[in-house]
Amino acid sequence: MSEGILYIVSAPSGAGKTSLVKALLERDRGLGLAISYTTRAPRPGEQDGVHYHFVGAERFAEMVAEGAFLEHAEVFGNRYGTAEASVREQLAGGRDLVLEIDWQGARQVRSRFPQAVSVFVLPPSARTLEERLRGRGQDSDAVIAGRMARAREEMAHYAEYDYLVVNDRFETALAELASVLAAERLRLARAELRLREVLRGLLADG
């Protein structure tokens, strides 16, 4: 059995990353989500163990000290991290996984998993991004300004990624993300392992 592929998807807040990944998981049953740990409070509709593992700051710090995280970062005053043991176990079992993390986390993961495939999702324009952030109706003008500054910082790291997807039309962006997965699964080094028996039969004499 070949090892699963680890995909990293990053984007500034408001670019639609979470919605795209959710739709991708619904479309592609061969793909799993690496569920992160976070110290932030659950948002309406979020479930512990489904969207995130919600933990207190003290427990998170303990996990950092234990070396439990593949990557961890602080974003808007909250901490996020991905448990390494769970990721390695699922990949070893042949499961493809997607990580929703920021550029800091992506950089940490690539140092441990240089074979990981990374995608950065961009909004079509700064104006559209601000409109999407305001459309949530959750934040003040000051918070929106902070998120826009953070978004510019995030987007400055786009060149560290393997693929760029612009989320202007949702269905087009989703199709492009799915194409990345398909292309990576068809790479010779991976396809050769998966198709070992087929190739043996095709190349056998007589």
Image: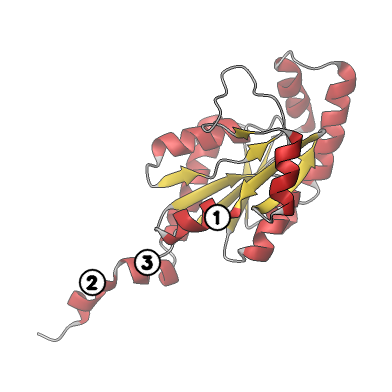
Q: Is residue 64 above or below residue 198?
A: above
Q: Secondary structure beneath disc 3?
A: helix
In which quadrant will I find the N terminus?
bottom left
Label 2: few (<14), some or many (≥20) within 10 Å? few
Rendered residue at 70%/39% (across/down): 59
Callout 1 touching callout 2 (CB < 8 Å): no
Where does the image place residue 107, in percent across and percent down from the top left? 72, 57
Q: Nearer the viewer, mark 1 or mark 2?
A: 1
Q: In the image shown, does 69 or 175 lie closer to the viewer?
A: 69
Label 3: few (<14), some or many (≥20) within 10 Å? few
Separation (CA) of disc 3 from disc 1: 26 Å
Does residue 110 appear to the left or right of 148 in the view shown?
Answer: left
Callout 3 touching callout 1 (CB < 8 Å): no
The residue pinned by badge 2 equals: 197
Q: In the image shown, does 54 or 141 lie closer to the viewer?
A: 54
Q: Is residue 79 above or below residue 119?
A: above
| Kind of residue at disc 3 | Ala
Where does the image place residue 198, in percent across and percent down from the top left? 23, 70
Rendered residue at 55%/55% (across/down): 85
Decide which of tag 3 and tag 2 comes sooner along the chain. Answer: 3
The residue pinned by badge 1 equals: 85
Instruction: Report the disc number at residue 191.
Output: 3
Rendered residue at 28%/72% (across/down): 196
